[in-house]
Image (cartoon, rainbow, N blue to C red):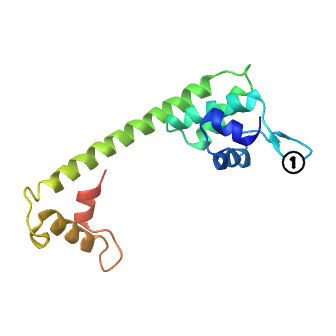
């Protein structure tokens, strides 16, 4: 199949397919005499594997590591387990960070409970003050910003 057909079959943009090829995640396909890429079923299956891993928010390095194991089926999968455990830890940290962000946004939202003029808006006032406090004269992050944005 040509790249457009692979793109349609895998719901993947053509540029993404080419990017995965450049990154070594997807092997280069054979080419026709007209220099068109010709993809086979294994390309589609590998692309689907990559896409599913990416949908689980795995980095390209994580996907690359998993593909190495997939390409060596006789190897032990202990390192695969370790990789997934690390990824789970990363996801757990991000969830905590997002919960902190949600709490901060809700606190910010409480600064303005009714429609007023923009100059009286507590949210805009707090955002303005926080933006002024972002970097102190010495180029260091202010304590206010750390308390508002530490996650």
User: Which residue lies at the image location 52% right of the left edge and 30% below the top edge?
Assistant: 84
Q: Quadrant of the N terminus?
A: top right
Q: Does residue 121 sit above or below 50 in this rendering?
A: below
Query: Could you say where residue 127 lies in the image, as x and y percent from the top left?
Result: 22, 66
**Residue toward you, 143 or 149:** 149
Q: State left or right for residue 74 relative to residue 90.
A: right
Quarter of the image for residue 120 reads: bottom left
Determine if residue 81 is in view: yes
Quarter of the image for residue 32 reads: top right
User: Which residue lies at the image location 49% right of the left edge and 35% below the top edge?
Assistant: 87
For the residue labelled by badge 1, is the local secondary structure a helix, a strand or a loop? loop
Query: Could you say where residue 14 lies in the image, as x and y percent from the top left?
Result: 66, 46
User: Which residue lies at the image location 62% right of the left edge and 45% below the top edge?
Assistant: 13
Q: State left or right for residue 107 relative to residue 44.
A: left
**Residue toward you, 47 or 77:** 47
Query: Could you say where residue 114 lies in the image, as x and y percent from the top left?
Result: 7, 57
Most extreme residue toward the bottom, as rendered?
Answer: 137
| Tag 1 residue | 35
Query: Could you say where residue 100 lies in the image, as x and y percent from the top left?
Result: 26, 46
Q: State left or right for residue 62 relative to residue 5.
A: left
Determine if residue 25 is in view: no
**Residue toward you, 44 or 50:** 44
């Amino acid at each position: 199949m040509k790249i457009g057909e692979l793109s349609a079959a895998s719901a993947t943009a053509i540029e993404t397919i080419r990017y995965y090829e450049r990154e070594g995640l997807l092997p280069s396909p054979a080419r026709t005499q007209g220099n068109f890429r010709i993809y086979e079923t294994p390309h589609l299956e590998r692309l689907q594997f990559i896409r599913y891993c990416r949908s689980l928010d795995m980095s390209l390095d994580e996907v690359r590591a998993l593909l190495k194991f997939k390409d060596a089926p006789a190897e032990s999968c202990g390192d695969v387990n370790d990789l997934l455990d690390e990824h789970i830890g990363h996801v757990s940290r991000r969830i905590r960070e997002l919960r902190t962000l949600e709490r901060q946004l809700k606190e910010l939202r409480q600064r303005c409970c009714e429609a007023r003029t923009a100059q009286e808006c507590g949210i805009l006032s707090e955002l303005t003050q926080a933006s002024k406090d972002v970097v102190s004269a010495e180029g260091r992050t202010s304590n206010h910003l750390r308390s508002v944005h530490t996650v």
